[in-house]
Amino acid sequence: MERLFVYGTLRRSYWNHRYIAHCRFIGKGLTKEKYAMFCNGIPFVCKEPKVSRIVGELYEVDEKTLQAIDRLEGHPDWYIRELTQVEVDGKTYTAWLYFCPEAKGVLIESGDYRDCKNF
């Protein structure tokens, strides 16, 4: 099993959550590092500039589910899946997160996709 940290349309109450609805939910959390979230209908997290910790949900996923999400996210040609550290309920986990190599859209300074107004 792998851990996956989702910050956008895979989160609960969004349209792509169906891809991971069957997976074990570990909890809501934040990345340990600061990144930049941009939004152009969908979110994009970039490693630079360092703006805020990213808000998301941590799941335990199997390899088949991870491969399906890789296809959805266009990994490695569109988003690039990399390991990062996330905090959930005071505990640190290593988890996969999908990064975008370049900024696209409006900066969401809070790091929370719920604050995106252009979708």
Image (cartoon, grey):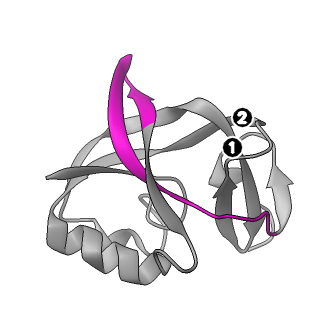
Say whether disc 2 or disc 1 marks the residue closer to the N-terminus: 2
Q: Is residue 99 magenta?
A: yes
Q: Is residue 31 above or below residue 99?
A: above
Total numbered labels placed on residues in the image = 2
Q: Residue at x 86, y 61 (%)?
A: 106
Mark 2 and mark 1 in contact? Answer it, CB < 8 Å: yes
Does residue 96 appear to the left or right of 111 in the view shown? left
Amino acid identity at mark 1:
Gly
Place of residue 58 in the rendered image (x, y in percent of width and height, measured from the top left): 35, 44
Q: Is residue 102 above or below residue 58?
A: below
- Element type at marker 1? loop
Label 1: few (<14), some (14–19) or many (≥20) C-alpha neighbours in 10 Å: many
The foreground one among 73 and 20 is: 73
Q: Residue at x 58, y 78 (%)?
A: 78
Place of residue 24 in the rendered image (x, y in percent of width and height, measured from the top left): 18, 51
The alpha-carbon separation of the residues under discs 2 and 1 comes to 6 Å
Does residue 63 appear to the left or right of 6 in the view shown? left
Label 2: few (<14), some (14–19) or many (≥20) C-alpha neighbours in 10 Å: some
The foreground one among 33 and 5 is: 33
- Element type at marker 2? strand
- Residue receiving disc 1: 111
Q: Which mark is residue 1?
A: none
The foreground one among 82 and 16 is: 82
The chief SS type of the magenta part is strand
Amino acid identity at mark 2:
Ser
Tell me the quadrant of the picture where the C terminus can be found.
bottom right
Based on the displayed image, in which of its 4 quarters is residue 118 positioned?
A: bottom right
- Residue receiving disc 2: 52
Q: Is residue 44 magenta?
A: no
Place of residue 6 in the rendered image (x, y in percent of width and height, measured from the top left): 45, 54
Q: Which stretch appears magenta?
A: 85-104
Place of residue 66 in the rendered image (x, y in percent of width and height, measured from the top left): 27, 68
